[in-house]
Amino acid sequence: MAGMPPATVEVSDAVVQCLVRDQRPDLGDRPLARVANGWDNATFRLGDDLAVRLPRRAEAVSLILHERRYLPDIARRSPVAVPVPVHAGQPTSDFPWPWSIVRWVPGAAAADVGPADRGPAAEGLSDFLLSLHVPAEAGVPVNPFRGVPLADRDSAVVERLGDRERYPQAAALREVWAQAGAAKAWGGPAMMLHGDLHPGNILLADDGSLAGVIDFGDVGAGDPAVDLAVGWLMFDAGARHRFMEAFGPAVEGDTWMRARGWALILSTAMLSNSDDNPRMFAVGEFGIRQILEG
């Protein structure tokens, strides 16, 4: 199965240090350390309170630009910290694309914390999503893979579940998928979405409460059910119930049914494409278990 796509440009610490010194000389003496090398972006911590985010492949350039455009407004509404851009980096002869300096968001990634210790974040995560999910203004991008009608993702799910070795529970998962597909389609306005909300992008404080949310490269507009799927990727049954209850009448039953379908889409994507990423593979395995619990 496919793993993480190769980088178009490998970004070294020295190149990043040069970019910062040339374009933000006031920050050039800060210590720099690589902290993440994701599918789309490389992230370096810059001192104590900043980070540098750079696309690692051409397809991710637009994601950096979307973060720049939409994160300031999201931050104004959010009850928790998000990586607000503070500098719009420009391309150079050493690095061909736009890049950003953003606020560093402290906290432990929920993907690195046991599921039992994520429960205290349930209500905080619902508060964050209630702040995020407002009608999108004209021009907000629509991701063809996130927040779209579930029928648009049917072929991908069917193909993945055809891998009987990887999905011994395929029959039960197909039933879940059919139930989600039978739910009423989203009929409201396209809402602002995070688009990639999973435990690797959710940060927790020492007491397990929500500290921040990161990686808004897939920010866009569409059905909010795609973000609500985090209830199955993040929480066991008890905490998930609290997460769902915290939304009250703001989210109705059909949206939760679609959200469970999105949890299946995202969990199978992680299981089928993360053989080289044990952390995300584990998130997918946990999601599948929770989906089957209900």
Image: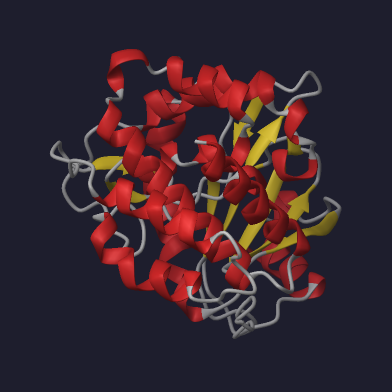
Please indicate whether residue 178 sits to the left or right of residue 104 in the image: left
Q: Which of 81 and 100 is in front in this view?
A: 81
Identity of the residue drawn at 55% across and 56% down: 267
Vertical order, 106 against 160 (above or below): above
Task: Note whether 165 is above or below 71 in the view shown.
Answer: below
Q: Residue 59's x, y, as percent? A: 45, 76
Left or right, 267 with respect to 155, comes to right
Q: Which of 49 and 5 is in front in this view?
A: 5
Residue 263 placement (x, y as % from top left): 47, 48
The residue drawn where x is 23% and y is 42% is 183
Which residue in the rendered view is the most extreme toward the front?
Answer: 171
Q: Which residue is drawn at 47% across and 55% down?
A: 173
Quarter occupied by residue 277: bottom right
Residue 68 appears in view: no
- Please name the residue shown 47% across and 60% down the image: 171
Q: Is residue 159 above or below residue 293?
A: below
Q: Is residue 85 left or right of residue 137?
A: right
Q: How many labels does the image show?
A: 0
Quarter holding residue 118? top right
65 or 38: nearer the eye?
38
Q: Residue 79 location, x and y as percent?
A: 51, 20
Above or below, 79 against 41 in this view is: above
Q: From the image, which quarter does the N terminus lie in?
A: bottom right
